[in-house]
Amino acid sequence: MNGFKPLGVHEVSDFNRSSFPKGFYEGAAFEGGKGPSIWDNFTHKYPEGKLSGGVNPEGIKYYNNLINELLAKGLQPYVTLFHWDVPHALEDEYGGFLKRRIVDDFRDYAELCFKEFGDRVKHWITINEPWSVSMNAYAFGKFAPGRCSDWLNLNCTGGDSGTEPYLTAHNQLLAHSAAANLYRIKYKSSQRGIIGITLISHWYEPATIAKADVDASKRGLDFMFGWYMNPLTRGEYPKSMRTLVGKRLPKFSKEESRELKGSFDFLGLNYYSSYYAADAPHLRNAAQPAIQTDSLINATFEHNGKPLGPMSASSWLCIYPKGLHNLLLYTKKTYKDPVIYITENGRDEFNDPTLSLEESLLDTYRIDYYYRHLYYLETAIRDGVNVKGYFAWSLLDNFEWDSGLSLRFGLVFVDFKDDQKRHPKLSAEWFKNFLVKSVDVFDWLHFVLKQLLYLDVLTDVMTCLSSMLQD
């Protein structure tokens, strides 16, 4: 389908962890590999959302126990300080990331974490996907606090999709630099850790070879990736954003610009999907400006009847593994060759209650997704991109934000109807085999065939096995 073919037996056996360079960290978090990243947040440590409100000793104890247990099992924690959960107290007091005041509160919170956990945590991520906060919470109103322009008729709680996304992105960048520079000045030399930020980006393919569409694809990257990477490497927003957004785009002071430039030891990069980009000057609307249209591009998964790739369950997730390779090369060339960790990569399926447990575990499509993305990742490393690690999203099926339990991203099936019992999917077994130095092909086929004995409908998997046996 769409140029994809099932995996061959040589691909299963020959491509594994040893294909990657020495020192590469694989974070699938299953038996054969290392451990999970830990999504920490300050609502558990500050009951009132900031240091002056007091510290929750039970929260500190919980994370100390968690970190210690991980280390005892040989797992290295990669700790994210903020994954979208602004304390309600700060939202009520001054509007959270809408106000510059949050920068100081975030820095204080980060310092508490450095003091309490920095003797054991050696990899810190300040903020996960600031783009997702600014867009989903302040442009589309899908995430808390649910803000957007009223003319969009999205039942938001207030807001302005033409200004608030830019303002919240600006304050997230300042919060990141405040925490990162504090760590590097005060704690890094003694604790011997590193600190970075995680960004998400799609890849944008030009819809045609016309210059207008090639330029549109670059603007797509500017408005999603360069929005953050330009300040982090150059201390200013991309020229395309400054031109198209104008006065609605905040400005950094000279001191802020200086502190932002180079304020990361590594870049966390989340990649899932890609789009076609076509020039769309007709989207300009001075009367109703919004970040959704400011870039003047039309982003689609299909152009002239040609899909970019197959779709996953999420409406935004078009599977295009080569996009990861393209994005990594673009990052190396455009943004001073940073150290990169792929901090999220994965695909989902619908939570189908009509499937038996055995059917739900046979996720051959997820194996295909991971194999192809890891292949292009390894190719990028061969091309000189400085990638140091990879984390699969996700270890477990989880509560997927505004989609709730309707989607499943996990390598491990979680039975939400039976006390959250966990069952490894076929992809988990594949990942375990990937993480060892070599794989016995017949052991792998024996495992797969054992799973098939439970099923009446075998078409998808038998097609895959047939191709493997032919190879």
Image: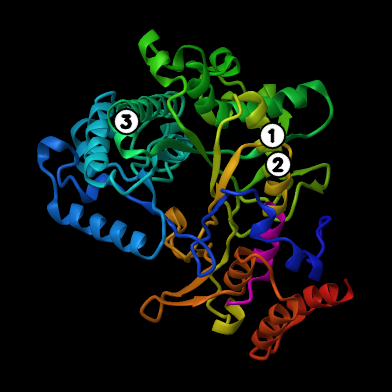
Query: In the rendered view, would you say 428 is above or below 146?
Result: below
Amino acid, disc 1: Leu
Is any part of residue 372 visible from this angle?
yes
Q: Which residue is denoted by mark 1 in the rendering?
A: 329
Is any part of residue 95 visible from this angle?
no
Q: Earlier in the sequence, mark 3 or mark 2?
A: 3
Amino acid, disc 2: Ala
Q: Farthest residue to the top: give it.
A: 254
Query: What's the CA distance linking mark 2 and mark 1?
Result: 7 Å
Q: Within the magenta stretch, is there residue 367?
A: yes
Q: Farthest residue to the right: give it.
A: 470
Image quadrant where one finds the N terminus: bottom right
Q: Is label 2 in contact with label 1 (beta carbons under 8 Å)?
A: yes
Q: Earlier in the sequence, mark 2 or mark 1?
A: 1
Query: In the rendered view, would you say 470 is above or below 291?
Result: below
Q: Which residue is denoted by mark 2 in the rendering?
A: 380
Q: Position of residue 227 (x, y in %)?
A: 52, 26
Q: Is label 3 in contact with label 2 (beta carbons under 8 Å)?
A: no
Q: Position of residue 410 (x, y in %)?
A: 52, 65
Query: What's the CA distance linking mark 3 and mark 2?
Result: 31 Å
Q: Nearer the viewer, residue 171 or 338?
A: 338
Identify the element where label 3 is drawn.
helix
Amino acid, disc 3: Ala
Q: Within the magenta stretch, is there residue 203?
A: no
Q: Which residue is denoted by mark 3 in the rendering?
A: 179
Asked whether, in this view, residue 100 is left or right of residue 431, the answer is left
Image point (23%, 43%), residue name: 88
Query: Which residues are the magenta region?
Result: 361-373
The overriding secondary structure of the stretch rendered in magenta is: helix
